[in-house]
Image (cartoon, grey):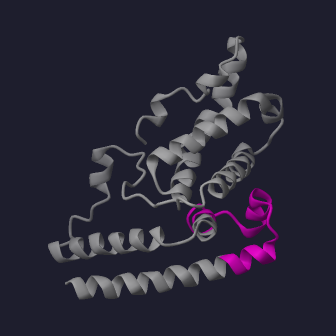
Amino acid sequence: MSGLMEIMVLPKRARPSHANAAAEFDHLLREHVPALYRSAYRWTGTADRAEDLVQELLVRLYPKLDELRGLDRIRPWALRVMYRIFVDQVRRERSSPVQFGTEPPEDIDEEEAQDRIDPSAGPAELLERELTQARVLAAWDRLGEEHRVVLSMHDIEDYSLPELAQIMDVPVGTLKSRLHRARAKLKGLLATERMSSLDRV
């Protein structure tokens, strides 16, 4: 995560004079930062922008420490705030479309990564997996922000449509339509990427 977890969760611009408040804020948010970063990465597509988005979120959340104390579930609430920040950023930067990066967000070390590799897989199978991953990344890169967000939150993070309706402040019916269109768009893009890959081969 390019050093994100090496930084104190507490934003530097908002460091309080009271150590107890700082420690409490860190305690409440630290466990949620990796998940928030993964969502930010899928939305923005680059590690730098994801880190900036999470950092901006933390800056916004610190003054709301009293509100955080009373929440039963912090993560959905934090995601809702982060989504609004993201939407505002996208609206300001429409002339520079958000790009999906090629650097995957990983929270595991090299030994754990090796454990994910199937030792029985042959060179051809490993190559096909790499090509498939490349096609998915290329297709994801061509999705719009709205489609990228709803797919990552629903199909990857496993949030229900009612939960997303609260996080994104969008009616469930609208989300259903958006999710259907996003899946259809991704499916079409994957088919296009597959044909492109075959042509290159």
Position above or below: 171 against 186? above
Rendering coords of residue 44 (x, y %) = 53, 55
Q: What residue span does the magenta drawing correspond to?
A: 152-178
Position above or below: 119 against 201? above
Residue 155 within the segment the image draws in magenta: yes
Picture quarter with the C terminus? bottom left
Q: Nearer the viewer, residue 6 or 201?
A: 201
Residue 147 picture quarter: bottom right
Q: Residue furthest front?
A: 95
Residue at image position (26%, 53%) is 114
Residue at image position (68%, 50%) is 79
Residue at image position (46%, 68%) is 141
Residue at image position (71%, 36%) is 60
Rendering coords of residue 133 (x, y %) = 35, 69
Magenta span dominant secondary structure: helix
Rendering coords of residue 57 (x, y %) = 66, 40
Residue 150 within the segment the image draws in magenta: no
Residue 31 picture quarter: top right
